Each structure stands twice: as structure tokens, then as C-alpha cells.
Amino acid sequence: MKDLDNIIQENRSEFDSFEPSDGHFKRFEQKLKELNKKKKTFTIGYMLKAAVVAILVVLSGLWVYDNFEPRTNNGIALSEISPEYGEVEMYYTHLVNQKYSEINQCETLDSTQKGMLMYELGEMDSIYTNLKKDLRTNPNDERVINAMIQHYQLKVEVMNQILQQLQQAQNINKQKSENYESTEI
């Protein structure tokens, strides 16, 4: 580097002998101003692109939060209120699951009928989910707790009625097949 400095110092007169042409500095300033103007201006296109990117980021963040975050607004279960309510909830949950399995084992229903029946029973579960949310906001409200217990009782009662009707239909089908077999002989 020192060699280069020495060369420049020794040959300074040769470097200084050339002058830029007339108007060089004005043209240079003009080019600098144009470059600065281009850098500072924002066009509507850039603004729209930035807005679209921001919206996509926000929407994807909301989607990820909605689909992958554990739900905290599902409410609380009766077992979180007291152990006694937990036992009641466990008893009815076991009973309801037992009724579900009995309905699934029923041979008189085809798959579409079972699907419709399960959908309707699922609708009853959405009511229970709303009650759980209400219980989260009012954990000591006896009305909500009683409504949850009554919901279980009602669901078991409805499922028992469904099973009775399915049993009656099965008996009628059995009698028809027995009568048909006896008339063939």
C-alpha cells in the first residue's frame, strides 16, 4: 500500500494534468440527485405488496394459532370443581360410552342410520361443551353444575330409549323371519 502511495506522490503532476470536461460536476450532481430521488420514493405497488405480505403473515399466524394451539376456551370439567362432581362425571361418562358401544353393536342399523344417530348425539355433546364454557366463567354456579349433570342424565335417558326402540325393531325382525321360516315348511 505504501508503494502505491509513493507512486501517486511521485507522479502527482501527471495525475493533476488532466481536468474533467466542462459541466462534469453539474452532470455528476444531477445523477446523484436522480439516484437519491429513486431511493426515497415509494410507489403504490410497493405499498400494496407490503400490505399483502402483512395480511398473509397475520392470517397464517391466526390459522396456526387456531389449529395448533391447545384450546383454553373449552371450559372446565366437573372434576375440576370437586372430587364428588368428578365421580358423578366419571359415572355418567362411563355409562354414556357403554351406551355408545351398544348402539354401535346394533345390527338393525345400517351405516347411514348409525352416522345420523351419532351426529345427533354429537349435537347433544355441543350443548355440553357450551355448559363447560359457562362453568369456566362461573365455577361456583350451582345452576351450571346441575345443568351439566341433567345433561348427562338426559343423554343417558335418550340413549336408553334409542336402544329400546332398536331392541323392539330387532325383535320384530326376528319374529318376521321366524314366521317366514315357519310358513316355508
Image (cartoon, rainbow, N blue to C red):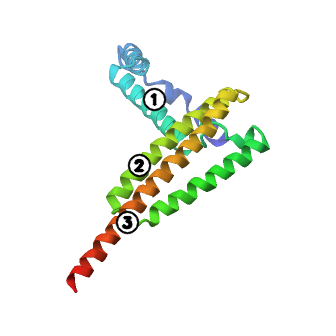
The image quarter containing residue 130 is top right
Q: Is mark 2 on a helix, strand or loop?
A: helix
Identified by mark 3, the residue type is: Gln
Compute the Cα span from label 2 to label 1: 40 Å
The image shows residue 25, relative to residue 89, as above or below, that is above
Q: Mark 2 points at which residue?
A: 119
Apparent side of residue 101 relative to residue 23 in the rendered image (left or right): right
- Whichever of callouts 3 and 1 sits on the residue coming sooner in the sequence is 1
Pinpoint residue 161: horizontal percent, then vertical percent.
46, 51
Compute the Cα span from label 3 to label 1: 61 Å
- Note whether residue 155 is visible: yes
The image quarter containing residue 177 is bottom left
Q: Mark 1 points at which residue?
A: 54
Identified by mark 1, the residue type is: Ala
- Name the residue at the bottom extreme: 185
- Residue beneath the point at 33% across and 63% down: 110
Pinpoint residue 172: horizontal percent, then vertical percent.
33, 65
Of the two numbered discs 2 and 1 in the rendering, the one whose residue sits closer to the viewer:
2
Q: Mark 3 points at which residue?
A: 170
Apparent side of residue 141 relative to residue 22 in the rendered image (left or right): right
Of the two numbered discs 2 and 3 in the rendering, the one whose residue sits closer to the viewer:
3
Apparent side of residue 85 relative to residue 33 in the rendered image (left or right): right
- Note whether residue 108 is visible: no
* Along the line of sight, the residue nearer the viewer: 38 or 82: 82
Identified by mark 2, the residue type is: Tyr
Q: What element carries label 1?
A: helix
- Whichever of callouts 2 and 3 sits on the residue coming sooner in the sequence is 2
